Image (cartoon, helix red, strand yellow):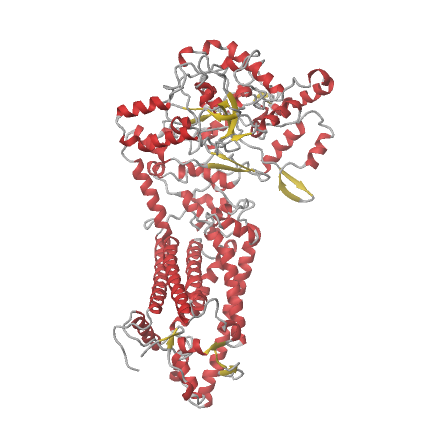
Amino acid sequence: MIRRYSHIFGASLVAIVSLTLYSAPVVADDELDCIMCHKYRGLSRIDEDGEFRLFYINQELFNSGPHRRNQCKDCHNDIDRIPHKPAVKVDCAQQCHIVEPSGEKRFTHESIAETLARSAHGKLDAEGNPKPFQEDYPDCKDCHDQPFYRPVSVDKGTIHPGVSERAVTRCKSCHKNGDFAEDFYEHVTSRLRKTRFPMETIENCAKCHQDPEFRERHELDDVVTSYKQTFHGKLIALGSEKTADCLDCHVVAGENTHLIESQSEPASAVYKTNVPATCGTEGCHTQAGPYLAGFQTHVTYDREKYPMQFYMLIFFKGLIAVVLYFFLALIFFELLRRLFPNFTFIREKR
Amino acid sequence: MNLFKRIVFKLYVLILMGFTVWYGMFMYPLIFGFEGKEEAALSLQELGDGVAADEEMFARLIEEQEHTSRTDLGFKVIEQPYIEGRFHHIGFSVQKDQTSMCVRCHGNIPHDKSVELRSFMNMHAFYLACETCHMPPEEGQPDHEFRWYDKDSGKLVPNPRALHDIEESYRTAARIYPTYGNYGAKIAPGIEENGSFRLLHGKKDMLFVERYISEQGRLTPEKKSQMERVIHRGVSEKPIECKYCHNDQDQFLPFAKLGYPPQWTTELTNSSVVGMIEKYKEFYIPSFLTPGIDEGAD
Amino acid sequence: MSRYEPIIYKDGKRYFYRFSVHQRVQHVILFSMVLLLAITGFPLRHAEEPWAKPLYDFMGGTDLAPLIHRAAGTVLLGLFVYHTIYWIVLFIRNDLGQLKAHGQLNFKTGIKAFFSQEMVPNMRDFHDIVDAWKYLLYFTNRPPRHERMSWREKFDYFAPYWGVPILGPAGVLLWWHDEVTHFIPGIVLNAAYIMHTDEALLAVLFLFFVHWYNVHYAPEKFPAATVWLTGYLTEDEMIHEHYSEYLRVMTEHGLEDEIRPQHFGGQEYEL
């Protein structure tokens, strides 16, 4: 919102610099001047359930993502004055004031909400009845915080993160006005790759799927821990972006990331017959043989479910323990022997 | 020399024996690591089993550790405190007040009475010591002097540099977003005596509060009331009101002296802030202004 | 073998032959590859630990470190094959050759010769282990006496000689996971994964403590033994670790009069 108007300030500065040099604060641009208070880091309270509520808005970070062209009121449409009562929870599926340029309609996240509703994460089952443990099913905000742009650039054939000044300069030779070129550049290039670093995606799924109580309620394995034991998980933990995170394998082919189905659904990307195709996705295991699908990804070393792994693990752990603790004991006693070299229970003659 | 050599030898052997034992303990989780994880999960489960909702809430609040979230944009990494359910980003961590005797009991977010004002109060508590508003000078006494003190060490510090950065941001049209309120320091009142300045709340008062907290367990309820009354001595029935500072005539806080640059001072005393206070005066509930002694002392 | 004198003298001190240059070079290749494999492998095994990422980045990050790991693994696997050919050639040329020269080569003597190779465990080792524990637990004042290769050295030898054929092929399967799944079921990769990671843990824990104790930490070795560079043991080391061999070699060279009494790790003991 600030960026959107800063060009106006720029223009007015040039025009009436002598008159209003000090009267054009960059910050006051929304109708209610929300930022007048919300720019203070300490604007906060503790709510009735003991939760810490912080109302601070970091303008710099707010302006680093796709929502920067929205005004506060576009989402928080219940606020009409200040000081205001506690705000109502934002409904992401509502229409905002941004006009969607391809269809000239007002923008909304409604279609995403619809996709989510028919996925494994939807609150209703196939017959339209509420699934048990309703409060466990996610809303937008359970997975998403304020999104950031993650632009990429291609310079001299190398791809690297960040905005390419060279590219933006080219855009700006025609699109001179304001920040349109920067906005558009970041909007498009952020979609050329994942909008989140894989580790963040994994931590996000882990918020529920690693919670033992949650898993018990829904009879789910600890898929996050078992995933982190795979090469996929380990390489991502070491900073790779080239290997598969949760979404790469679990999103239904050809759909957006919000359509994740249970592995028991035939449409699911991880349904038995779909696994080879999922592994062979472009950029992944394209050369793989059909048997790669037989590799077990989420191994929990449960004796009933994964007997081979369980017994191999027991064998190796036993082997390691026996060999090493034997030698550790040997060395310990050898050192002890050196402390009292002349002592012995039975003295032998030469 | 021979004796010395033998002592060194035995010492080395003893150290190696220690190392062997350490290695044995070091290896254990590496070899049997998967059991530890399951045990941890089980113990967590036990914590959550069969307790009432409020007990669970209490247990969770106590157990919960502050942790950070990390967002990697490729060209920069944003690390910030994680707050459950929060949509907007914070971007940086704050320096907590380690030296205020009030914060020791009332915490950093003490205000919660007035629905309309509590967040504003807490916002001010971020850079104003409690005694600034809650312990104004009594009738007939000389005005307080005000200085900034470091939240970490409690020592007096010069006026924060950040105040100038904010002023700079008014003067330029560039995208500069200064940090408001997070100066690592707070304004606190004090008394100028014989040419030297001392804070109203000094180290001595803090020690007194620490002692009270550590011995609370063995005090009788009557004693506790006595002590609390003494600790809260000087806390006024009528705290400083918004308009005392946010007016264009005569401000309670000497903005200029505290390092507030001119344009920002004007903003605080003249235009939108005062306007807001005036415009929404119906929210201003005088009954909220009960003595600080009751405020959050529960 | 005849190139090396069993006993040499330098600065008036006696040194006893152990390893040829050929073997020493193999050892250098072995340990440098193992260390390389460990520092490019363990950050992956413990990817969640705070030290993992800096170390992995230092080793070239997720793009380069796996290549280093695979290259080092290939060299090590090559060394394993080479070493196997090496001892088979030695065995045929020396042991069987000797028997043949004396006209005694048959199936029975051949098998016997196989089991009397210096790195192959035998009954004597069992007795030596019992002797060692008797001494360590103060049941005797007579330290164990070892021949040319003690049972502990045989363990040191078989740690990599058993480890590499477990780790290597498993590593190869994991490396060529796409290609091999045209022929073998995916669950074999699960097995290979467990074999590779757990055997690696055994190898590294053993190396860093047991082997390094034997050659680095032990009071008489600290800070490091030199036999891997020189190929020769000092007389003290010989007496401590290979007293049986010491007695034999000294006798063979007519030095009975100069045989020194046994001691344990540099400490004289009283009989």
Q: Looking at the image, which is closer to me, B22 or C128?
A: B22
Q: Quadrant of the N terminus of chain B?
A: bottom left
Q: Looking at the image, which is closer to me, B86 or C185?
A: B86
Q: State the residue at coordinates (62%, 38%).
A: A162
The image position of residue A100, as x and y in percent, is 59, 23
- Taking A4 as reference, is B4 left or right? left
Q: Looking at the image, which is closer to me, A246 or B219?
A: B219
Residue A81, visible in the rendered structure? no
The image position of residue A233, as x and y in percent, is 47, 46
The image position of residue B99, as x and y in percent, is 44, 31
- Taking C180 as reference, is B44 left or right? left
The image position of residue C72, as x and y in percent, is 54, 61
Q: Quadrant of the C terminus of chain B?
A: top left
Instruction: Name, please, the residue furthest toward the front.
Output: B194
**In which image quadrant can residue A86 be found?**
top left
- Taking B16 as reference, is C139 left or right? left
